[in-house]
Image: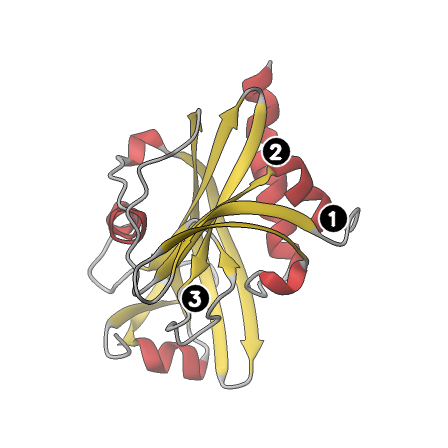
Amino acid sequence: METELIKIVDENGTELGVAPREEIHRLGHWHETFHCWFVTRENKVDYIHLQLRSEDKKDYPNLLDITTAGHLLADETVSDGLREVKEEVGIELALSELIPLGVIPYEVVRGDLIDRERAHTYLYIQEGPINNYELQKEEVAGIVRIEFSKFRELWTGKSLNVHIEGFCHTKDGEAFIMKETVGKEAFVPHEEEFYQEIIKKISVYLERAER
């Protein structure tokens, strides 16, 4: 995976060349990714769904993250990012079923990792629960849901923790139900401004949908 070729871009998305994934993160080249956040509306309550990263992941194991996300390879377009949805959670979607939230640039520098991404960001919203997740266990250990209003309170500083519930798999493949109260330390440490921007964009859509 570290040898996969990824497009190098500048902050505005202009193509500059290609490089292996390892070099992208070591030297901090800007590159493009695909993010898709899942929200369900159940009994007039909105829930955001997050993945629990596998304990075998090199970066951020056992932390909660974007529902599905991945790098766009050098020869891929944004629509090719849909393969991440199919691979990671087993749901096949068309780009027309998603709501575009724009391109969100962000940077994370932690130790030897310099991650500079232009994230092509989408929202998938469904009435009623999503029950047909089929997880790519090498990548995703589980899926949890959080009341969206509570998720917003956590990342806007109005609360210190949030209740999560969902299902996970052990390394042996056994499934179990997860119900916990967690703080920000349970989430991948994207910048708080990144979470706040995502929440703002999703909130705008949800408010329009209620009218």
Across and down, in percent, residue 127 comes to: 44, 23
- Please name which of the two marks, 3 or 1, marks the residue nearer to the observer: 1
Which image quarter is the C terminus in? Answer: top right
Decide which of 40, 94 is in the foreground and name it: 40
Judge from the rendering whether residue 38 lies leftward or rightward of residue 17; answer left or right: right
Q: Which amino acid lies under the numbered mark 2 shown in the image of this protein?
A: Ser
Using the rendered view, name the quadrant where residue 20 is placed. Answer: bottom left
Across and down, in percent, residue 42 comes to: 52, 24
Instruction: Identify which residue is drawn at 24% across, 79% down.
Output: 3
Q: In this view, does 42 lie above or below 47?
A: above
Specify which label sits upstream in the sequence, 3 or 1. Answer: 3
Q: In this view, does 36 lie above or below 190?
A: above
- Please name which of the two marks, 2 or 3, marks the residue nearer to the observer: 2
Q: Which amino acid lies under the numbered mark 1 shown in the image of this protein?
A: Thr
Across and down, in percent, residue 119 comes to: 44, 55
Can residue 34 be seen here? The reply is no
Q: Name the residue under label 2.
A: 203
Decide which of 165, 183 is in the foreground and name it: 165
Decide which of 134, 67 is in the foreground and name it: 134
Looking at the image, the residue that sits furthest to the right is 158
Q: Name the residue under label 1.
A: 156
Q: Which amino acid lies under the numbered mark 3 shown in the image of this protein?
A: Asp
Q: Mark 3 points at which residue?
A: 10
